[in-house]
Structure formats: structure tokens, C-alpha cells
Image (cartoon, rainbow, N blue to C red):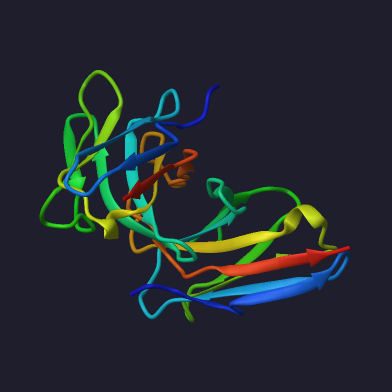
Amino acid sequence: NAGVMQNPRHLVRRRGQEARLRCSPMKGHSHVYWYRQLPEEGLKFMVYLQKENIIDESGMPKERFSAEFPKEGPSILRIQQVVRGDSAAYFCASSPEVHSYNEQFFGPGTRLTVL
Amino acid sequence: QQPVQSPQAVILREGEDAVINCSSSKALYSVHWYRQKHGEAPVFLMILLKGGEQKGHEKISASFNEKKQQSSLYLTASQLSYSGTYFCGTERGQGAQKLVFGQGTRLTINP
């Protein structure tokens, strides 16, 4: 059973370009979470999605950031007009259908560098 | 709202024990523990629920004091592979929810 997959693993963009980060959850998982981690810091929640729905986007910056989880295909985190402050590791995690234990399993992350 | 972890860093010799603490000012439903090695993804270790249920690795033990909103992770007879940064993540309610993570505790195990 493959784990959570993310690609690309490393992404370099110049200021003003767009970044697209993809996340395929574990098989059988329908909940996807995106977290951002700055160097030497903890993980900060960004957005929680189920198929075709955004459930909680309280951690998403109001501008330039968007996320989707279509019926078919991976979840996408999109950052428009990137700035240097967007440089970070972006992790997605997935969890199975809701039950008592909301175990979240993390992907390897995408390390975004903005030049 | 972010839970507070202590200590921030700890250095041990192989075979020694360590306790990592996580405290929240808010009522919690669950506490999750993860270990992250440099440049890698966080790896799930354990989840503790309000009411006493828990699920995780056999070699890892932890406690959750619901009244104090505190959790502790116990690492006994530490091995070199235990090195990394440990994060606690907290949930306020039942069901699929975001995790709010502490700032991390860096554990270094020396031979």
C-alpha cells in the first residue's frame, strides 16, 4: 500500500511565478490536509479538503493561495505570484474515513525555493 | 492556541531515558505525536484520545492528562534511531480536524 505521494519533491521558482504542488493521498483515504513548515519551525495548518470540498481553510493566506481536491486526480496547492517568504516545505497528510482515531499520514513534502 | 513543548532540546547518551511534554491552554480531544528527521516527513508515533484510548507503536509510551491538557511522551532505553525532532499535534474535537502543532523538541542521541 503506497504512502502519501507528493510531487515535485523540490521546486524552484522566481518571484512572480506560479507554483503547483500535488498530493495523492494513501489508497482509501478521502481526507487531505496541507501544512507548511518554515526552516527550524513546526508545522502550520493551511487547509483541509475532502473530495471536491474545502472543509477548513482557516490557515490559508487570503491572497495568492488556493487548494482543490477534485473528484479525480490529486489534490493541488497553488501559489500564484510567489514571493521569497513562500519558501518553505509544504507537506500534505491524509487520513481515512472519520472514526475515533484521526491518524494523519504525511507525504515526503515539496520544498519550494523562491529566488 | 499553539501547544507548548518542553524541553526545546535534549541530548542523551544511548540507553538513557527522556520525557517530552506538551501543554495546551485549550480543552483537547486528542494529542498526536510525530517524529521528524532532518529533511524528511513527520512519522506518526502515537495518538491519545480523551477518555483514555490510545493507539501507536508498541515501543513508544505516552500519557494524556485531560484535566491539565498535558501529554508526555516517554522514550526509554533510547537508541540512535530515536534522534530527531518530536512534535505534538492537538485536536480540539472529535472527527477529522486540523492538527495544531507545537514548536518541536529536538532530541539528539549520542553513542
Question: A63 and B29: which one is in front?
Answer: A63
> Does residue B106 show up?
yes
Q: Quadrant of the N terminus of chain A?
A: top right
Left or right: residue A107 compared with residue A86: right
> In this rendering, is residue B1 above or below A92?
below
Question: B104 and B53: which one is in front?
Answer: B104
Left or right: residue A75 compared with residue A95: left
Question: B8 and B77: which one is in front?
Answer: B8
> Does residue B51 show up?
no
**Number of labelled discs?**
0
> In this rendering, is residue B30 above or below B67?
above
> In this rendering, is residue A6 above or below B28?
above
At x 22%, y 49%, the residue is A15
| Image coords of residue B108 (percent x, y) | 73, 66
| Image coords of residue B40 (percent x, y) | 56, 46
Left or right: residue B57 compared with residue A64: right
From this viewpoint, which residue is outermost toward the left? Answer: A63
Q: Quadrant of residue A87?
A: bottom left
From this viewpoint, which residue is outermost toward the top? Answer: A72
| Image coords of residue B92 (percent x, y) | 34, 64
At x 75%, y 74%, the residue is B11
Q: Quadrant of residue A73?
A: top left
Q: Quadrant of residue A93?
A: top left
| Image coords of residue B20 (percent x, y) | 64, 72
At x 51%, y 64%, the residue is B88
Left or right: residue B48 compared with residue A49: right
At x 38%, y 73%, the residue is B2
